[in-house]
Image (cartoon, grey):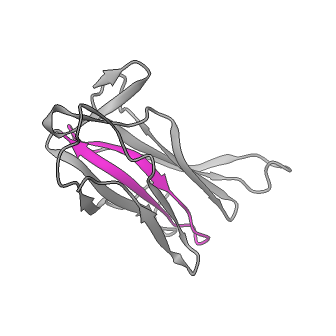
């Protein structure tokens, strides 16, 4: 469902969830690396959305040197599934998780996660893992959604992450 300056992900009951367009939604900096993610459409006419993520080598910038893209990728599902509202973080060991919302005309709004481990091939993410499902359809035709999702490194164990996401119960 397209609206000027924004796009919505189709959900159940003829409703739609606001993807907040293609704005950068989340980012994290750790150990000389910067990760970020945002929602985009696979094409200008697509009636769904996907998530694009990036990892940059920052080094000693802005004092000296340059920022270089180390890797990036798209997470896109088969039609009619949309992914949007990414939350991303990074630990000092080079791993970074990604939290996303998935919806379609048969799925109200589910929460999923994936990750890139430091041992994974560049430009790849692991499979999406299901976390939680909304119990019912959105409440109105156009719904603001998920822009409070977050994920961060556990301060007591850098191998774990804490996250929060949105579902309807």
Most foreground residue, 119 or 88:
88
Residue 18 within the segment the image draws in magenta? no
Residue 82 within the segment the image draws in magenta? yes
Q: Residue at x 36, y 43 (%)?
A: 145
* Residue 91 drawn above or below residue 159: above
For residue 45, say whether it is visible.
Answer: no
* Residue 31 drawn above or below residue 16: below
* Residue 56 drawn above or below residue 78: below
Most foreground residue, 137 or 70:
137
* Residue 97 drawn above or below residue 37: below
For residue 169, say whether it is visible.
Answer: yes
Q: Count the marks: how many? A: 0
**Looking at this rendering, what residue extends furthest in the right direction?**
63
Left or right: 107, with 162 as reference point: left
Q: Residue at x 53, y 60 (%)?
A: 89
Residue 99 placement (x, y as % from top left): 40, 57
Left or right: 53, with 12 as reference point: right
Residue 70 placement (x, y as % from top left): 60, 51
Residue 75 placement (x, y as % from top left): 37, 47
Left or right: 55, with 127 as reference point: right
Q: Residue at x 50, y 56 (%)?
A: 88
**Looking at this rendering, what residue extends furthest in the top direction?**
4
Q: Quadrant of the C terminus?
A: bottom left
Q: Quadrant of the N terminus?
A: top left
Most foreground residue, 14 or 69:
14
Left or right: 49, with 14 as reference point: right
Q: Which residues are drawn in magenta?
A: 77-104
């Amino acid at each position: 469902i397209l609206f000027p300056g924004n796009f919505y992900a189709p959900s159940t009951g003829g409703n739609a969830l606001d993807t907040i367009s293609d704005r950068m939604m989340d980012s994290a900096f750790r150990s000389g690396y910067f990760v970020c993610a945002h929602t985009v459409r696979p094409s200008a006419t697509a009636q769904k959305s996907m998530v694009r993520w990036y990892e940059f080598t920052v080094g000693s910038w802005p004092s000296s040197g340059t920022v270089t893209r180390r890797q990036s990728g798209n997470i896109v599902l088969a039609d009619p599934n949309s992914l949007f509202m990414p939350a991303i973080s990074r630990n000092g060991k080079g791993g970074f998780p990604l939290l996303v919302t998935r919806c379609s005309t048969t799925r109200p709004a589910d929460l999923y996660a994936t990750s890139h481990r430091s041992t994974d091939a560049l430009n790849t993410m692991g499979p999406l893992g299901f976390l939680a499902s909304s119990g019912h359809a959105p409440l109105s035709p156009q719904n603001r959604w998920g822009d409070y999702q977050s994920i961060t490194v556990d301060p007591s164990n850098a191998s774990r992450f804490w996250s929060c996401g949105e579902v309807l119960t």
